[in-house]
Image: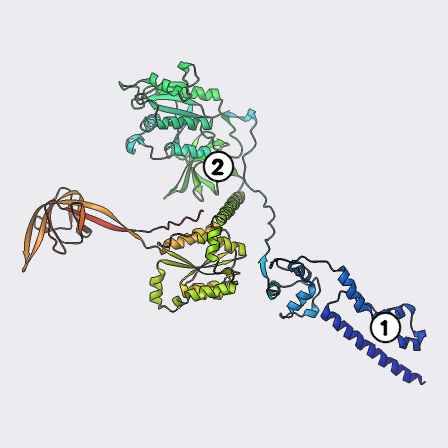
């Protein structure tokens, strides 16, 4: 046989073998048989036999097994294939899942995933088991499989480094120096606490205060003739003292218990004793008003025995001093008793290093800005120091003493007024000095973060409790929609509210005054369910109707904007975003978008929206009252106008205001005056004790004894009575 013809025949056989291999390869891709391709010759077995010298033994074996490779591989895979547990119709998905991971999550084989991906624009032939799928394709595969998906919970963020400021370790006793004692005066109302303070600081605050109740909070320093100093806290009763104690601040070293000698132990006296015991603070008894004839100091001491307050005369350890705060008697004896007790307590502090203190009073001054009165407990405070208190900080600009005099430094035990705070801290907050403004920012950021985390934990607890409480009620309400998909629910909600879309703008505005339509978008189903459960507890429809017109997952879209425009609604988003184009579109159409990452803030924002929809309530404020003493009539043209001769009993009558006529305590007329005269002269205002003549705008008849009330109407913004539990 011609060798050239044989070579051509071999090439033809090679081409046929290559075509068969391509067919086998395409079949494998369609069916996804799990086998690895091996290199082999394209020649059939019979061609090898023609020229055995051209072939090696291993290649001969490979070709012999080629016809059976596909079937053997498929059988092997059936044996090796693991049984994957099926899910109950809900798949937990996450971003960047591979084909194999999605199949495992769905409880399906990989062929099922490839079949579902045929409905997408993905080139299926280019995919492998470890190929990463886009989130949209993952969702589509799950939907095409007749299943629902839920987003997997994000991994907990790495534990944030604690950057809070803390107190320094206890100081070396060798560096401690004596400090003034901090004294709080407590007692029953009208037993003379403010008068005692007034006598101690030699001012006339008590004479300006109403009812003997302290009108301001603060601290002041008393200098004794002996050179000793005592810091007194001027507190407005027991609530402030309890609040400070509850925050863990023990500013007070000594409590002076003021008891009136003629009244004895009263309710607030007992409360004061309990406060002192709870704080672990020693007592000094000041029996006040001993200058009065009915004073009985011994009775006071005996009554205090029932409350475990035993005076020294009765074998106890409580010093008792009889004083008269009004006349200033025995005040120095009281001061000396305080100093003696302070010496026994050995009150010392470290005046070096970073400052530590406590906020006694905080306020916002119109000229000075946020201002605090503080007591320094450690270190020496100077101008320029950077302080942190609560969730705010300050760079000290100025410091003042209790008399308003500027000071350059404040040592332990000294009260001082501090300017330079960014925000107003709370009374009782701990003050700590830090190294720099940057450090202060770190501390405030950490404390804000911790508060948010604690609030979120409480939110979760509240939500879970509310879910349990309203579970049955919620399921009953949602029973009609429970069998529907999200798309069908949206359709039902749309049909239910479709008629509103065809109202004229004016009709819709009038209808929307007492209705808030909201659209809720969230990141995961759990967020949506939690928010809807809270909204289900809304029970103030008589004030303002709350209507959830749409809810769903994902970022804010143009569809949400269009729906909000149609219903004059507000969009609330939880852990979702709105891109710049969506924000611009919303601003153009006047649609509010409220985005939040904390549920309680979203609910508070929603409450504010509800409050803005409530009509203001009108309140009447009485300006003046007058009594009708006589009745006569005046002829104007052909008409007789009844006129009442009145005397103003209280306040004044202003013709510009509104009036009402009372007869036997019943209102029989409301309106405006047609005339108001005094000695035949038209006047605008009639004051108390003056006589006048007046007529009403509708010619109402008067009777002697009628009451004329002048009043002013004021609009007050209402707030919703709905309490979501936050």
Residue at label 2?
Answer: 431
Residue 682 at x, y percent in the picture: 11, 52
Residue 299 at x, y percent in the picture: 34, 18
* Quadrant of residue 296 within the rendered picture: top left
Query: Residue 434, which numbered label?
Result: none
User: Do tag 2 and tag 1 residues touch (Cβ < 8 Å)?
Assistant: no
Q: Residue at x 44, y 23 (%)?
A: 282
Query: 495 or 300: which is nearer to us?
Result: 495
Q: Residue at x 17, y 54 (%)?
A: 672
Instruction: Identify the secondary structure beneath mark 2.
Output: strand
Instruction: Give the Cα separation between the discs numbered 2 and 1.
Output: 85 Å
CA neighbours of label 2 inside 10 A, class few (<14), some (14 to 19), many (20+): many
* Quadrant of residue 567 within the rendered picture: bottom left
Query: 141 or 437: which is nearer to us?
Result: 141
Measured along the vertical axis of the image, is residue 597 above or below residue 72? above
Q: Residue at x 35, y 62 (%)?
A: 511
Residue at label 1?
Answer: 41
Residue 348 at x, y percent in the picture: 50, 25
Q: Report whether residue 189 is seen.
A: yes
- Left-right relation of 315 to 159: left
How is colour applied across the structure in the image? rainbow
């Amino acid at each position: 046989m011609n060798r050239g013809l044989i070579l051509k025949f071999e090439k033809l056989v090679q081409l046929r073998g290559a075509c068969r291999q391509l067919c086998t390869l395409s079949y494998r891709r369609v069916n996804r048989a799990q086998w690895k391709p091996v290199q082999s010759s394209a020649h059939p077995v019979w061609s090898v036999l023609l020229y055995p010298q051209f072939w090696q033994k291993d290649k001969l074996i490979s070709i012999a097994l080629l016809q059976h490779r596909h079937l053997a591989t498929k059988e092997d895979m059936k044996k090796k294939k693991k049984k994957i547990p099926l899910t109950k119709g809900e798949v937990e998905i996450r971003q960047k899942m591979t084909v194999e991971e999605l199949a495992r999550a769905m409880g399906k084989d990989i062929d099922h995933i490839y079949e579902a991906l045929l409905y997408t624009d993905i080139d299926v032939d280019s995919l492998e088991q470890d190929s990463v799928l886009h989130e949209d394709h993952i969702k589509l595969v799950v939907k095409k499989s007749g299943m629902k998906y839920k987003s997997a919970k994000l991994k907990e963020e790495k534990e944030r480094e604690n950057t809070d400021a803390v107190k320094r370790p206890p100081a070396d006793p060798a560096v401690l120096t004596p400090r003034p004692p901090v004294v709080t005066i407590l007692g029953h109302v009208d037993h003379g606490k403010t008068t005692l303070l007034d006598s101690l600081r030699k001012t006339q605050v008590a004479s300006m205060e109403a009812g003997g109740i302290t009108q301001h909070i603060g601290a002041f320093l008393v200098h004794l003739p002996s050179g000793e100093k005592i810091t007194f806290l001027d507190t407005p009763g027991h609530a402030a003292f309890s609040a400070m104690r509850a925050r863990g601040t023990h500013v007070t070293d000594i409590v002076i218990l003021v008891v009136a000698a003629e009244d004895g132990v009263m309710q607030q006296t007992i409360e004061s004793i309990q406060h002192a015991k709870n704080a672990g603070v020693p007592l000094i008894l000041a029996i006040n008003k001993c200058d009065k004839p009915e004073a009985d100091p011994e009775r006071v001491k005996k009554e205090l025995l029932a409350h475990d307050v035993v005076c020294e005369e009765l074998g106890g350890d409580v010093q008792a001093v009889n004083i008269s705060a009004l006349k200033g008697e025995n005040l120095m004896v009281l001061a000396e008793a305080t100093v003696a007790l302070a010496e026994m307590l050995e009150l010392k502090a470290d005046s070096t290093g970073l400052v530590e203190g406590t906020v006694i009073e905080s306020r916002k001054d119109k000229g000075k800005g946020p201002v605090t009165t503080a007591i320094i407990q450690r270190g020496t405070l100077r101008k320029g120091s950077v302080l942190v208190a609560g969730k705010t900080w300050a760079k000290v600009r100025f410091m003042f003493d209790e008399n308003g005099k500027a000071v350059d430094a404040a040592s332990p035990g000294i009260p001082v007024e501090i300017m330079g705070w960014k925000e107003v801290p709370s009374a009782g907050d701990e003050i700590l000095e830090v190294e720099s403004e940057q450090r202060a920012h770190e501390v405030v950021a950490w404390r804000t973060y911790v508060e948010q985390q604690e609030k979120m934990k409480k939110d979760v607890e509240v939500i879970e409790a509310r879910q349990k409480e309203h579970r049955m009620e919620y399921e009953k309400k949602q029973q009609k929609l429970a069998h529907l998909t999200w798309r069908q629910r949206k359709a039902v909600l749309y049909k239910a509210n479709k008629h509103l879309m065809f109202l004229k703008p004016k009709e819709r505005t009038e209808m929307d005054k007492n209705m808030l339509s909201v659209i809720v978008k969230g990141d995961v189903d759990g967020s949506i369910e939690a928010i809807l459960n809270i909204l289900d507890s809304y029970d103030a429809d008589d004030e303002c109707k709350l209507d959830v017109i749409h809810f769903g997952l994902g970022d804010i879209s143009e569809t949400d904007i269009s729906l909000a425009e149609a219903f004059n609604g507000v969009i609330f988003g939880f852990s979702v975003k709105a891109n710049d184009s969506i924000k611009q579109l919303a601003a153009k159409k006047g649609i509010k978008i409220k985005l939040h990452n904390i549920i309680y803030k979203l609910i508070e924002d929603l409450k504010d929206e509800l409050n803005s929809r409530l009509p203001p309530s009108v309140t009447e404020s009485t300006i003046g009252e007058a009594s009708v003493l006589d009745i006569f009539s005046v002829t104007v043209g052909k008409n007789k106008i009844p006129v009442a001769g009145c005397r103003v009993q209280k306040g004044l009558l202003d013709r510009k205001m509104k009036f009402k006529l009372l007869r036997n305590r019943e209102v029989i007329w409301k309106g405006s005056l047609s005339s108001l005269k005094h000695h035949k002269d038209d006047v605008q205002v009639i004051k108390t004790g003056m006589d006048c003549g007046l007529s009403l705008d509708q010619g109402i008849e008067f009777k002697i004894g009628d009451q004329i009330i002048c009043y002013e109407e004021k609009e007050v913004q209402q707030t919703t009575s709905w309490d979501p539990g936050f």
